[in-house]
Image (cartoon, grey):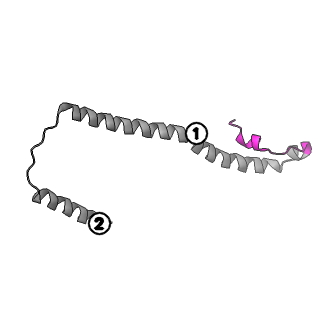
Amino acid sequence: MKKTILIIVNILCLMTILTQTCCAYLDPATTSYVIQIIAGVVIACGAAIGIFWNKITRKFRKKSDIEEKSQNKATASDSETGKVITADDLLDDE
């Protein structure tokens, strides 16, 4: 991994040294455009995390709920009432 990074750095350095000088004009709107791109990427990542956060936490919560309910299933109160754990019980957000 380190060798690959060193090779890439060396290639970039050689490309920088061996290239000719180029005159270019960056207008102020270019900076504004770059800032908008960065802000858009940050907002999109935040939205994606927000959308999937509930799904991720629900998946971990389901595992702990299933373990708790399987432990509680063997108790006397559940066996006396004949309660059966359904999918709706596992999906409850409580």
* CA distance for labels 2 and 1: 38 Å
Seen from the viewer's position, the closer of residues 77 and 35 is: 35
Please rate how many residues cluster around mark 1, counting C-alpha atoms within 10 Å: few if below 14, some from 14 to 19, many from 20.
few
- Residue at 11%, 56% (x, y): give it: 19
- Residue at 57%, 45% (x, y): give it: 56
Q: Is residue 85 magenta?
A: yes
Is residue 4 placed above or below 20 in the rendered structure? below
Image location (x, y in percent) of residue 72: 79, 47
Seen from the viewer's position, the closer of residues 76 and 59 is: 59
Q: In the structure shown, which secondary structural element does the residue marked by tag 2 occupy?
A: helix
Q: Is residue 89 magenta?
A: yes
Is residue 57 placed above or below 12 in the rendered structure? above
In the displayed structure image, the side of residue 64 where residue 84 appears, left or right = right
Image location (x, y in percent) of residue 51: 53, 38
Quarter of the rendering containing residue 92: top right
> Which quarter of the figure is the N terminus placed in?
bottom left
Query: In this figure, what is the number of numbered marks?
Result: 2
Image location (x, y in percent) of residue 33: 27, 34
- The residue carrying mark 2 is 4
Q: Which portion, as a residue range, is magenta?
A: 80-94
In the displayed structure image, the side of residue 8 where residue 67 appears, left or right = right
Is residue 50 placed above or below 17 in the rendered structure? above
Which label is found at residue 54?
Answer: 1
Q: Indicate which disc, 2 or 1, sits on the residue closer to the N terminus.
A: 2
Which label is found at residue 64?
Answer: none
- For this orientation, the residue located farthest to the right is 80
Is residue 17 placed above or below 40 in the rendered structure? below
Amino acid of disc 1: Asn
Image location (x, y in percent) of residue 29: 22, 31
